[in-house]
Image: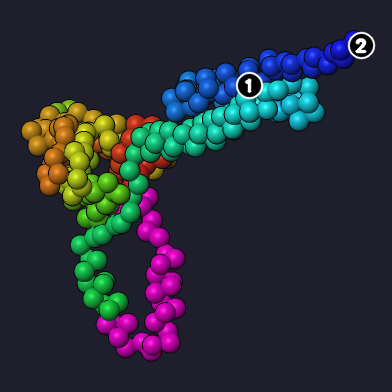
Amino acid sequence: MSESVTPEVPAKKTSGLAIAGLVLGILAALGSFLPIINNLSFILAVVGLILAIIALVGALKGKHDSKGMAIAGVVLCAVSCVVVLVTQKAYGDALNKATSGSEPVAVSSASSTATEAQSASSGQAASSAEAPKTEEKKEEEKPDYSNLAVGSSVQLDGGLTVTVNSVDKSLKSYNDKPIVGVNVTYVNNGQKSESFNTFDWKGEDANGAQRSTTFYGDSQDSLSSGKLSPGGSATGNLYFEDGTVRVCYYNNVFNDSPTAAWNL
């Protein structure tokens, strides 16, 4: 009597797509935090995700025995894509802040104290029903930093305050050509060092043409350049060509428009 032979069940093959998806997911995850390199990581993650999904579908149909590897590849690639997008946004925001510089957050002038006192007195006389409307209106109004009066100060979000103190249009250069002198002050009320420089400023004429500072013979009180420690201040004069009607302050060389501007 012959013995029955049980046929051997062939072992399921390992999926090459699952292996490729997992490897690409690992590589993408390693570079997903690195700037510039994570652009390549995103491509690897997308390709790996596609391969891992195809491998997972094949495993579910019983074509191979690499379900766990395919799932791991899908998870790694998907997480890598998310990490790349999040980190690139963070790097982009940091770069934008670095190139655009600090933003103005408040403006004050010599008459601001009197104005505030008058507003407070008017507020006390107003009815309680009108008070919320007045506060809401004040919150909606934003200062115009591009048409400030001489004597006004602009505070930036980093703590630096810039003031145009006075203007002298009676000056004349060595060749008897009229010069406009502008006295400015920087005060650092922030927690880190801030820079000051004559190249922060440009003078604008009535036609909208902006020019850098010009030479003035008696310039011993000219604004220099340097760094201000927290709590430090610097005051100096800027000199512009005759016809300058507005002085513009740029707190970053990459800015297309001035951070603040004063009408002379």
Q: Earlier in the sequence, mark 2 or mark 1?
A: 2
Considering every residue shown, the one lying at the far top of the view is 2
The tag on residue 12 is: none
Q: Nearer the viewer, residue 144 or 99?
A: 99
Residue under the point 29% across and 31% down? 212
The tag on residue 21 is: 1
Residue under the point 76% across and 30% down? 60
The quadrant in which residue 152 appears is bottom left
Q: Residues within 10 Å of mark 2 (few under 14, many from 20)?
A: few
Q: In this figure, which residue is indicated by the disc labeled 2?
A: 1
Quarter of the image with the N terminus is top right
Q: Nearer the viewer, residue 126 or 245?
A: 126
Q: Which span is picked out in magenta?
A: 121-150
Q: Position of residue 201 (x, y in %)?
A: 28, 37
For label 1, the SS is helix
CB atoms at circles 2 and 1 under 8 Å apart? no
Residue under the point 39% across and 70% down? 138
Q: Position of residue 202 (x, y in %)?
A: 31, 36
Q: Is residue 203 above or below residue 115?
A: above
Residue 81 in sight: no
Q: Is residue 214 left or right of residue 138?
A: left
Q: Position of residue 159 (x, y in %)?
A: 24, 49
Mark 2 residue type: Met
For label 2, the SS is loop
Residue under the point 14% across and 44% down? 230
Mark 1 residue type: Gly
In magenta stretch: residue 237 = no
